[in-house]
Amino acid sequence: MVENDFVLNSTLKLPLEGKVSWKAPSNIALVKYWGKKENQIPANPSISFTLDACTTRTTLSYSKLNRASDNFSFDLFFEGKKKEDFKPKINTFFQRIEKYIPFLKSYHFKIETSNSFPHSSGIASSASGMAALALCLMSIEKQINPQIKNTYFNQKASFLARLGSGSACRSIEGNLIQWGDYKAIPESSNLFGVKYPFEVHPNFKNFHDTILLVHKGQKTVSSTVGHELMHNHPFAQERFKQAHTNLDTLKEVISSGDLEKFIEVVESEALTLHAMMMTSLPYFLLMKPNTLEIINRIWSFRQATKTPICFTLDAGANVHILYPEKVKEKAIQFIQDELVAYCENGHYICDRIGNGAKKISSSER
Ligand code: DP6
């Protein structure tokens, strides 16, 4: 697929009005996307677990205008309240996707969105949010052009979501999604995420991700700025190469079920991500003292008990604790006994690997 395959024919007849709702999950990267080229093209391939509990629900109502407007016409409601400060991000998203969704200026939209996780939890909602909105737009496209197949629907939803936020392209389907050109997966693409096509060992089915909310405030540096700082970064080229090597290793691990090696790759990826931040110019730190306390506790516990439990990090201070179903009780006990104390107000979220986005409802005229 190339970009032009995603352009909708603009001569098709448009529906008058309607409403569609989707629920899309967040995802957690095992090999991280950090650094991008123009048009949201990743500098290296990444892979993630789709999550289950952390989701965004979006309802998109659309009513056709008498004549196409010059600007995008939409109202945005977040958790029931009008949210003007989210609008510029949506506006930029619409600008980026207009070529592929030519009906955007023919409608007035009402976007109503809410998250399953608390608003200020430090969990980025851009992946699930952009994925949910992209899926709503695809439902309208499907109404205009009913021939489109499911594969195309999902691919284009991922393609659009990517233009909103890179990692969002991995939030359409489950359970393991790979994004970015990578030689061992011939169908891989820089344009959209694909379902991981190889055998997955039972160890990685029902994997858990308990998210420890270490710092719920705003991040000091956004991911978008962080990606930018990978341009002219002294270690960038090596890092991009390393992502390919880590994917090669993970491919072996995912089929063999080797949890020890899994832990090594995943923790190294998390620390490398933060090492890139610390070695950019300007440099910055998103980990907090409690992030490090948690990491050290995990290492001690793992050494003492041989429990295959590990951590990964997003671009923030929160810690994602990953473990297989078979050690669930032990892991939860450990988290409650030793780690919850390092969470802001003792808050954490129990999540697990999930099956992807779901359509909730639609009505049209
Ligand atoms: C650290 O997808 O949030 O979570 O494309 O600028 O919106 P933009 O960035 P974003 O970056 C996510 C970075 C990451 C790693 C990952 O999810 O792969």
Image: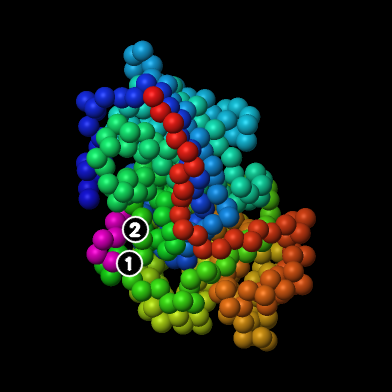
**Percent x, y for residue 244?**
35, 69
Q: Looking at the rendering, which quadrant does residue 233 occupy?
A: bottom left
Label the magenta part by its dominant secondary structure: loop
The answer to whether residue 336 is visible is yes
Q: Is residue 302 above or below residue 352?
A: below
- Over which residues does the magenta segment extend? 185-191
Question: Observer-nearest residue: 271 or 205?
Answer: 205
Q: CB of mark 1 within 8 Å of CB of mark 2?
A: yes
Amino acid, disc 2: Val
Query: Which residue bears the numbered disc 2?
Result: 194
Amino acid, disc 1: Pro
Q: Is the residue indicated by label 1 positioned so its CB lies within 8 Å of ligand 1?
A: no
Residue appearing at x 55%, y 49% in the figure = 55
Query: Which residue bears the numbered disc 1?
Result: 197
Question: Observer-nearest residue: 37 or 202?
Answer: 202
Residue 282 among magenta residues: no
Left or right of 140: which side holds 7? Answer: left
**Percent x, y for residue 159?**
34, 46
